[in-house]
Image (cartoon, helix red, strand yellow):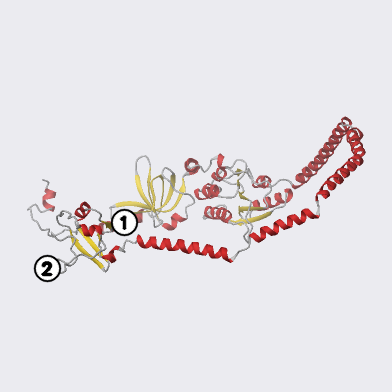
Amino acid sequence: MSPEYEAGYDVSGRLLAEERSGDNAPPLSVSELSALLKRTVEDRFGHVRLRGEISGFKRAGSGHIYLCLKDDNAVIDGVMWKGGAARLPFAPQDGVEVIATGKLTTYPGRSKYQIVIDRMELAGEGALMALLEKLKQKLAAEGLFDRSAKRRLPFMPRVIGVVTSPTGAVIRDILHRLEDRCPTQVLLWPVLVQGQGAAEQIARAVRGFSAMQPGGPIPRPDLVIVARGGGSIEDLWSFNEEIVVRAVAECSIPIISAVGHETDTTLCDYAADMRAPTPTAAAEMAVPVRAELLAMLTEQGLRMDRAVRRGAAQARERLEMQARLMPTPDTLLAPQRQRLDQLSDGLGSALRHRIADARTHLGQASGALRPALLRQYVSRAAERVARLQLRPDYLERVYRDRATAFDRLSRLFTSVNPDLPLQRGFARVMAGDRLVKSVADAQAAGAVSLRFRDGAVDATIGGAAPLEKPPAEAISNPSRPPRKPRGGKETGQQDLFSG
């Protein structure tokens, strides 16, 4: 062990730290050391510009942006607060090379250093084109540039909506060109065409035109033109923003993109239904030339007149040819005229024959109508009427016959009345609602009901007793009352079921 170590440190193995004489380095807390490092880094690197590729890009719900900037050998964390993130002229993505301006600081919570970004720009036109190509591929994969979904422009739009700057030369060129070709009502939605917030205003204008309802206080456009003059790729970048491209692709009105000049191309051009090389060309695509339309209508009118005249002449020629081939009226009517003459000649003789036949028939009928025949017919009819009159003796005979028949039916009903024998002392044996007619039925029922003239009693069936033959007197004269026994005592009615 070196002497310096032995002289500066206690090697006695003590557990408690003690201050030694001459020691001018008191121990620091972790927070104090982190604060010293933070002040040192921020003082030394208060303003830096870093060039690197974005990696791990993330936008928090609060609006802050967190990312990493890297090159081939190193990586540094970065953060951009909500206010700066809202002012970004482009949408950061992983893989895009940028130049970030800000200051270095430390994050004591994790003992890491990071750059707080105030401004972020694309690192040259190559990075901008790479970002543009990446966004183009993404939107194309979603079908926003599909040509099969493009709509045809209306031939003669009554109202045209224009999304552009109200102070630039673009709107004047469009109005002038429309005035020369075909005057049309124009609705201008003023927006910024470059700079901070331009993309949001353009998208809002396109969606606003699309949301208009027909028949409202402001007429709904039949066609929309999104226009801007020429410029660099940075000037036209608002029309490459995803929010603008999606608004143009989702617009329910046919739309023309006229951004830049001949060689300028933006993603808005791919999403629109039609691309115009210039705003003036967009106005030419939007409406036809009124003078040419009038000339075309005049020419079409002349052609129609010639066609009608030529058709009438040809029809007249065909009619004359057909008329020459058709027979004359005298030829067509000659047979009918001859037949009419024949019929008119035979009409007089036919009428005379008809009258003669009628007279003959009348004479035959009048000969049969004699007064004696009529009186005979009336007499027979009177006899029939007399026979049909209602006589009292006939009614009395019918009444007696009906009364006799009714008496016979009444006696028959009385004789077949099932309750009449009960009045003479008989009883009816019932098993529920069924009449018991034999011993077997009574034994099968077990319990029966004996119905008399003044009520009913229940009985239980016992063993069957042999049937005793009735006395000869009862059989010979059943209506005679039974004789008294020799003892002089009368016996009551015998129980049918007693032993």
Q: Position of residue 27 (x, y in %)?
A: 19, 58
Residue 459 picture quarter: bottom left
Q: Position of residue 80 (x, y in %)?
A: 40, 54
Q: How many marks?
A: 2
| Residue matched to label 1 | 38
Residue position marked by numbered label 2 in the rendering: 487
Disc 1 and disc 2: Cα gap in Å?
Answer: 152 Å
Q: Indicate the amino acid at tag 2.
A: Gly
Give the residue furthest to the top: 325
> Badges 1 and 2: C-beta atoms under 8 Å apart?
no
The tag earlier along the polypeptide, 1 or 2, is 1
Q: Nearer the viewer, residue 497 or 404?
A: 404
| Quadrant that contains the C terminus | bottom left
Going by the numbered disc 1, the residue's amino acid type is: Lys
Residue 28 visible in this rendered orientation of the protein: no
Give the crowd class for mark 1: few <14, some 14-19, many >=20 residues within 10 Å. Answer: some
Examine the image and state in which quarter residue 332 appears. Answer: top right
Residue at the spot x=91%, y=36% of the render? 342
- Looking at the image, which is closer to me, 450 or 313? 450
How many residues crowd mark 2 within 10 Å: few (<14), some (14–19), many (20+)?
few
Q: Nearer the viewer, mark 1 or mark 2?
A: 2
Q: Position of residue 131 (x, y in %)?
A: 47, 43
Residue 462 coordinates in the image, percent (x, y)? 15, 57
Left or right of residue 487, residue 267 in this image: right
Relative to 212, say whether 154 is above or below. above
Callout 2: helix, strand or loop? Answer: loop
Q: In the image, what residue occupies the spot 35% across and 47% down?
A: 76
Q: Residue at x 87, y 30 (%)?
A: 325
Tell me: residue 396, above or below residue 208. below
